[in-house]
Image: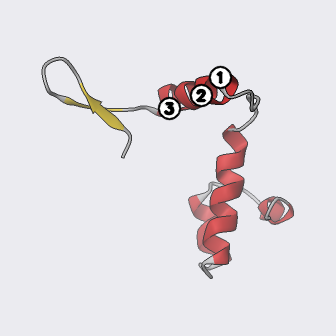
């Protein structure tokens, strides 16, 4: 999903740190701030729960250690 081709044509996957750096640079350029990393987990949990995915599956997939994620769901 997040990859590019290098100068030799090889497919290079974008690692998490680089993806977050790139997203941060775009958000800063747009004046949207920089606090967003945790929002992906919250947004993902909200999305899958809205699709009626079993909450236990959502908790495990999001690496939530407790039911605390339920307080963030939008």
User: What kind of element bears circle 3?
Assistant: helix
Mark 3, Cα crowd under 10 Å, few <14 / some 14-19 / many 20+, is: some
Side (left or right) of 50 relative to 57: right
- Nearest the camera: 22 or 68? 22
- What is the distance, in whole Å, between disc 3 and disc 2 at their CAs? 11 Å
Mark 1, Cα crowd under 10 Å, few <14 / some 14-19 / many 20+, is: few
Mark 2, Cα crowd under 10 Å, few <14 / some 14-19 / many 20+, is: some
Q: Looking at the image, is 52 positioned above or below residue 13?
A: below
Image coords of residue 66 (percent x, y): 77, 60
Q: Nearer the viewer, mark 3 or mark 1?
A: 1
Image coords of residue 33 (percent x, y): 76, 29
Q: Looking at the image, is 1 positioned above or below residue 55?
A: above
Image coords of residue 32 (percent x, y): 74, 32
User: Of marks 3 and 1, which one's residue comes earlier in the chain?
Assistant: 3
Residue position for label 2: 26
Where, quadrant-wise, is the C terminus in this rendering? bottom right
Side (left or right) of 16 relative to 62: left
Q: In the picture, residue 4 is in which quadrant?
A: top left
| x 62%, y 57%: residue | 62
User: What kind of element bears circle 1?
Assistant: helix
Residue 19 shows which numbered tag? 3
- What is the distance, in whole Å, between disc 3 and disc 1 at their CAs? 15 Å
- Nearest the camera: 72 or 74? 74
Residue position for label 1: 29
Asked if the residues shown at circle 2 and circle 1 are in contact, with their CB atoms under 8 angstroms apart, the answer is yes
User: Of marks 3 and 2, which one's residue comes earlier in the chain?
Assistant: 3
Q: Nearer the viewer, mark 3 or mark 2?
A: 2
């Amino acid at each position: 999903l997040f990859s590019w081709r290098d100068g030799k044509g090889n497919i290079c996957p974008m690692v998490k740190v680089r993806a977050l750096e790139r997203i941060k640079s775009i958000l800063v350029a747009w004046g949207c701030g920089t606090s967003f990393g945790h929002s992906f987990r919250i947004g993902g949990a909200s999305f899958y729960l809205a699709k009626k995915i079993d909450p236990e599956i959502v908790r495990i997939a999001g690496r939530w250690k407790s039911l605390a994620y339920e307080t963030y769901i939008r």
